[in-house]
Amino acid sequence: MKIVKTLEELRTARTHLNAPVGLVPTMGFLHAGHLSLVQCARQDCASVVVSIYVNPTQFGPNEDFAAYPRDVDRDLDLLRDAGVNLVWVPTEEVMYPHGYQTFVTVEEITQVLEGAMRPTHFRGVTTIVAKLFNAVQPDKAFFGQKDAQQVAVLQQMVRDLNFNLEMVVCPIVREKDGLALSSRNIYLDVDQRKAALVLSRSLRKARELFAAGERDAIKIHQAMDAVFADEPLARSQYISLVDPKTLLDIEKIETEALVSMAVYMGKTRLIDNTILGKPDLTLDQP
Ligand code: PAF
């Protein structure tokens, strides 16, 4: 496994990779969710590139950029074991050198859900991912369904800016009890960790109702609120049912609905989602 830092090193190493080349962009502190993206990429591509970069522009002023967990040596061991070909660990000088002033903005769909709560977040994500795509020139790029809005925003950017690559969306990975894997789970104390099951419990409730024929988004929302009412340690910031592509609210579900949420457990903000109308093995199994 080759490890590079600068753009020049990356470009040289890229020329030696067999096609198709898959890119898994990460912010490091890897868990089984990231490794499942690497597995997807290995199955689909002859070569796999992973980037590790905690991108400052996608954190708001009061968010956890400085405290975001980092352990590059451990990440590199995991990626070596996972059979990755090339790892790019750029520094801030490489990504945002002095005088940097260009940003990529996707408009409407970044203004709802996560974007409404974190106004500059997606501008940072689209900017860094566009830069990663330009530098690595992957044939395929792998992202997790866990960040459902990020997937929708990046798919929009790829279409709008004619990036010549295929976006591959891989399923959410959960602990056995249902908690979606996240680098932020390490912040949860024992009681919060137990209480955090309310996210997957409420999503399962939504899926049960949908499976039983319920198509009224308000009724599904109310049933989810009732699940939250039984869990005093959780404070939901939003729960919403939207069209998976436009991210606009829906009242009656015709074919599919993205049910997503952000929830505070103490100071830790967790997100989770499911798409009604699509199989979700991790939530449908008892
Ligand atoms: O999903 C993430 O970890 C980040 O948003 C990404 C895509 C690596 C961009 O920094």
Image (cartoon, rainbow, N blue to C red):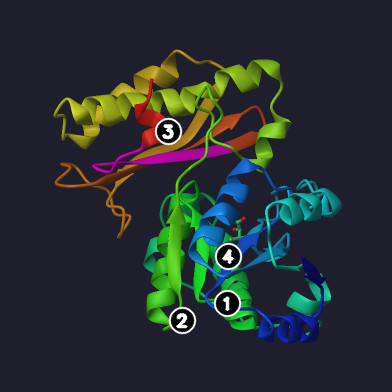
Location of residue 50 by image quarter: bottom right
Answer with mark 1 or mark 2, whichever residue precedes in sequence. Answer: 1
Residue highlighted by disc 1:
133
Residue highlighted by disc 2:
163
Q: Amino acid at mark 2?
A: Phe
Q: Is residue 212 left or right of residue 122?
A: left
Q: Amino acid at mark 1?
A: Phe
Q: Is residue 196 left or right of residue 49?
A: left
Q: Which mark is residue 183?
A: none
Residue highlighted by disc 3:
282
Closer to viewer: mark 3 or mark 4: 3
Q: Is residue 116 left or right of residue 12?
A: left
Disc 1 and disc 2 in contact, CB within 8 angstroms: yes
Residue highlighted by disc 4:
125
Inspect this view and state whether residue 96 appears: no
Residue 42 point in image, percent of width and height: 56, 60
Q: Which residues are magenta?
A: 270-280
Answer with mark 2 or mark 3, whichever residue precedes in sequence. Answer: 2
Q: Quadrant of the C terminus?
A: top left
Inspect this view and state whether residue 129 appears: yes
Closer to viewer: mark 2 or mark 4: 2
In this view, the residue farthest toward the top is: 230
Location of residue 266 by image quarter: top right
Q: Residue at x 62, y 71 (%)?
A: 128
Residue 15 point in image, percent of width and height: 67, 86
Residue 248 point in image, percent of width and height: 29, 54
